Image: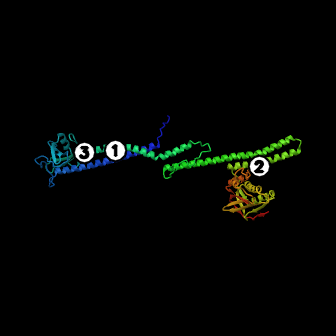
Amino acid sequence: MAPVLRRPVSLTARLVLTVVALTVVVTVVAGGVTSVAVGRFLHDRLDNEVRAELARVTLSPDGSRLSPGDGDGDELGPPPGQPVGTVTAQLPGDASGGEGSVLLQRDPGEAANVPLSEADLAVLARVPDDGDLHDVDLPVLGEYRVAAVPAESGDAASFVTGLPTEPVHEVVRTMVLWELLLLVLSAVAAWLGGRFLVRRQLRPLREVAATADDVARLPLATDEVDLHDRVPGHLRDERTEVGRVGDALANLLSHVGTSFAARRRVEEQIRRFVADASHELRTPLTTIGGYVQLARRRPDDREATATALTKVEEESARMTALVEDLLLLARLDSGRPLERREVDVTKLMLEAVADARVVGADHRWRLDVPDDALVVVGDPLRLHQVVTNLLTNARKYTPAGSTVTARAAQRDGAVVLAVHDDGPGFDDDAAAHAFERFARGDPARVRAGGVGLGLALVEAIVVAHGGAAHLESRPGDTTVSVTLPVGVSVPGPATTVDA
């Protein structure tokens, strides 16, 4: 059997229905309690009046109990001032031939005796003469609250007095009718007032929903969409529930806008990366193609063929190095784990500076390391590449005779490697993009300066080791430093080389 789909009910309708239901429940409970309390009060007062009337009928002025026939004549003489409808009866013990009367007060202070019917007397004769209150239904007069006591003298006579319960019932019925009318009016007022107030209070929530709907209709695939400050300030009051929803939506849109901006930056970097890589690969490929054509046109010229093969080999090595660097960057970006073992940074610096001194004999090389050998946990090959790239970068971009200083130190719980040179340094724009891929200070792309991946590789490798890279540069004072998590400090001899 297919499930029955219920029509969704709006939050406004649910809140209004809740308000109406609570109003109805409170009104019913209050009305019920009031009706019961008033009815109980009126019944208690009626009982007290019955007892008082019984005492007035049966007691003489001196407080003694009256006997049958002690009134004026032999009839029961009701005292003046009794309530309208009071029943007073003098009954014989055999319940036959008794007399009775009902007092009806026409005007204040004036009363008349009306004889009771035989049917009413028969019902009153069955009331126990124990002095307690009893409910009876008189065939002619209706429902009464009565009490009976035996006479002081005379074995077969008793007094019965009672008051009608209809006035009490009438008051309770009237109260219930008014309460029902009040219930209906309260429900209608709660519906109208609740609908107005709830819709007014939920107006900010509708504005938030409208804002979200407007954002959903925006062409988010384009780059021109700005999602910041889309939610008005009056909808972001964190002291209210709707304000917290609005603030959450504003934060969400801000994060989405930031993500879009980051995505655009990444896409732009990818496009630039592809363009730069294509440019760097196209140049050696063009060179290789040109020399291959040269060799093909002069098959008998051994010198031209040898020159062509040499150039092809050089450009092939250049492309191989570029592809390997790109592959390493891709692996680091994908989060592939590096080799993790203890690396003696002091020894690594010694070897790197020694190699740099051979390649860059026209520079002055200095090495400054502490007395204790510094050990970090990482990939020795990649860390060696970091130092080599820093030294190579300093050698390539400084004139002959410049001084390059390599330092290693332990500082603030980390190992800091730094390469300083006194060359011309980076301009402001180049310094801002120094660690980006294919970033070079020469806008004309002079190939002698490299492809612009050296510092990018440095930062990627250092970040993969949990460290950070930093550049400070001004004319005559340039320092590139990397910070690595500290390893184990092993005592060893200090090494300082000045060449």
Label 3 sits on what residue type?
Pro
Distance in Å between CA atoms under marks 2 and 3: 112 Å
Q: Relative to the observer, which residue lies in front, 275 or 126?
A: 275
Contact between marks 3 and 1 (CB within 8 A): the answer is: no
Residue 303 visible here:
yes
Label 2 sits on what residue type?
Ala
Residue bearing the label numbered 1: 182
Which of label 3 and label 1 is nearer to you? Answer: 1
The mark total stands at 3
Q: State the SS at label 1.
A: helix
Residue bearing the label numbered 2: 321
Give the number of the disc on residue 167: 3
Q: Earlier in the sequence, mark 1 or mark 2?
A: 1
Label 1 sits on what residue type?
Leu
**Residue 167 horizontal/vertical position (percent):** 24, 45
Label 3 neighbour load within 10 Å: few <14, some 14-19, many 20+: few
**Residue 191 horizontal/vertical position (percent):** 40, 43
Where is 351 relative to 231, above or below?
Answer: below
Instruction: Tell me where residue 393 sits by quadrant.
Output: bottom right
Distance in Å between CA atoms under marks 3 and 1: 22 Å
Q: State the SS at label 3.
A: helix
Instruction: Tell me where residue 182 sits by quadrant.
Output: top left
**Residue 488 horizontal/vertical position (percent):** 69, 61
Q: Relative to the observer, which residue lies in front, 34 or 165?
A: 34
Tell me: 164 left or right of 338.
left
